[in-house]
Image (tube, rainbow, N blue to C red):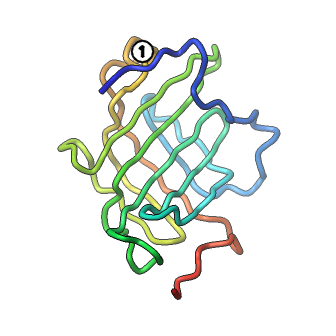
């Protein structure tokens, strides 16, 4: 896996806590074990993946589920995620990136449905700052759901 330079963050849409909705839709805990609230979730079918993007104060978590020739939700395998990616920033504005893929032996059980995702897995450090500060990776434990009334893809074809 190639390491990215952290001078200019590749993706920095993390919002200050005061700009996030009040409703807590889940949590994520990694590294220091602190439980962090998830307050924004987007769920979408992006063929052949079903992608769930969660945001909290200073972090983003993305979980992807795969389906062979997925054209509708019934084609997606929700029993095991295909990928998990975490992007976080600390108080000193250091950006950290971690990822894991289904094909890697360290991937733990991460399951879901069209409305929720959760599990525990090891994530590999993929940024120089993450490697320098936290070594080769971190364990993450998380669970989150899509907001009630969110525009989930139609389960019918």
When asked about the image quadrant of residue 94, the answer is top right
Asked if residue 2 lies left or right of residue 147, the reply is left
Residue farthest along the bottom direction in this orientation: 156
Residue 124 vertical position relative to residue 73 in the rendered view, above or below: above
Residue 126's spot in the image, x, y percent? 39, 26
Which residue is drawn at the image coordinates 44% and 36% (left, top)? 30
Q: Residues within 10 Å of mark 1 (few under 14, many from 20)?
A: many
Residue 24's spot in the image, x, y percent? 67, 55
Front in this rendered view, residue 47 or 153: 47
Residue farthest along the left direction in this orientation: 105
Residue farthest along the right direction in this orientation: 18
Residue 139 vertical position relative to residue 145 in the rendered view, above or below: above
Q: Give the total of numbered labels.
A: 1
Which residue is drawn at the image coordinates 64% and 32% (left, top)? 58
Residue 136 vertical position relative to residue 53 in the rendered view, above or below: above
Asked if residue 132 lies left or right of residue 122, the reply is right
Residue 90's spot in the image, x, y percent? 59, 22
Residue 3's spot in the image, x, y percent? 38, 20
Which residue is drawn at the image coordinates 68% and 52% (left, top)? 40
Q: Provide the secondary structure element on which disc 1 rests.
A: helix
When asked about the image quadrant of residue 123, the answer is top left
Quadrant of the rendering where the N terminus is positioned: top left
Mark 1 = which residue? 128
Which residue is drawn at the image coordinates 62% and 49% (left, top)? 38
């Amino acid at each position: 896996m190639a390491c990215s330079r952290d001078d200019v963050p590749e993706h920095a849409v993390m919002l200050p806590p005061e700009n996030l909705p009040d409703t807590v839709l889940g949590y994520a805990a990694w590294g220091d074990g602190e439980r962090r609230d998830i307050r924004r979730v987007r769920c979408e079918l992006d063929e052949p993946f079903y992608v769930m993007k969660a945001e909290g104060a200073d972090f983003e978590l993305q979980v992807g589920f795969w389906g062979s020739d997925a054209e509708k939700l019934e084609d997606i395998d929700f029993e095991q995620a295909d990928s998990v990616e975490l992007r976080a920033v600390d108080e000193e504005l250091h950006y950290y990136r971690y990822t894991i893929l289904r094909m890697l032996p360290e991937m733990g059980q991460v399951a879901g449905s069209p409305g929720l995702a959760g599990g525990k897995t090891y994530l590999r450090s993929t940024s120089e700052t993450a490697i320098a500060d936290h070594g080769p990776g971190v364990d993450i434990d998380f669970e989150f759901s899509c907001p009630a009334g969110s525009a989930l893809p139609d389960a019918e074809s």
